[in-house]
Amino acid sequence: MGHKAHNIGVAAQIGKYSDAVETAPNLRWLFTSGTPGLAENKQLPKDITGQSELAWERVPKMLREADMTADDIVKVTQYLTRAEDIADYAKVRYKFLGEARPAFMLLVVPQLVWPEILVEIEVIAAKAATAAP
């Protein structure tokens, strides 16, 4: 994996993530765009759980395109439009991440690109480059 968690005791008081993540040198990096819980047919679930599940379903697809997994995620930035959705959103996030403990940033913002969007996530991942055949 090539990542080392550095925990100073703050993150553990709040959730299942690391205070900081250090990566090894010479890694390939993947930066995703903000990803909302929007279905491929442009349908948008009305609740935070439905939107969160759709948004997190996109992450492994993007990771696979780069030959990466959730273990390669080093940072997740999350945007919610309602503070009361944090607990339900976190359940979905932890279901996807399993034991991975990237660094997190969660912001509650007044609105995202469409007023109906309740959540948007972006991910930074890093993995060792594979040797060319």
Image (cartoon, rainbow, N blue to C red):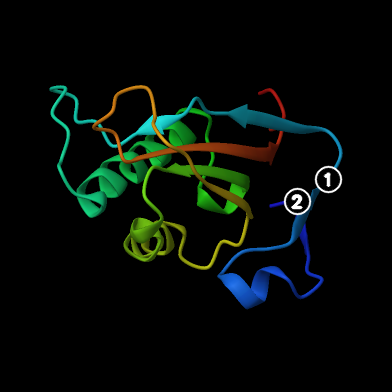
Counting other residues with Cα less than 10 Å from the Cα at mark 2, is it few (<14), some (14-19), or many (20 or more)? some
User: Where is mark 2, residue-wise?
Assistant: 2
The picture places residue 29, in percent across and down from the top left corner, at: 68, 30
Q: What element carries label 1?
A: loop
Residue located 83% across and 45% down the image? 24
Return the disc, 2 or 1, that comes first in the chain's sequence.
Answer: 2
User: Where is mark 1, residue-wise?
Assistant: 24
User: Nearest the camera: 10 or 2?
Assistant: 10
The relative height of residue 111 versus residue 93 in the rendered view (above or below) is: above
The picture places residue 58, in percent across and down from the top left corner, at: 35, 36
Labels 2 and 1 touching (C-beta < 8 A): yes
Does residue 58 appear left or right of residue 30 in this picture? Answer: left
Rounded to the nearest whole Å, what is the CA distance between mark 2 and mark 1? 5 Å
The relative height of residue 90 versus residue 52 in the rendered view (above or below) is: below
User: Nearest the camera: 51 or 108?
Assistant: 108
Residue 89 visible somewhere in the drawing: no
Quadrant of the image occupied by residue 13? bottom right
The relative height of residue 29 versus residue 13 in the rendered view (above or below) is: above
Amino acid on which disc 2 is placed: Gly
Residue located 86% across and 39% down the image? 25
Farthest front residue in view: 110
Residue 22 visible somewhere in the drawing: yes
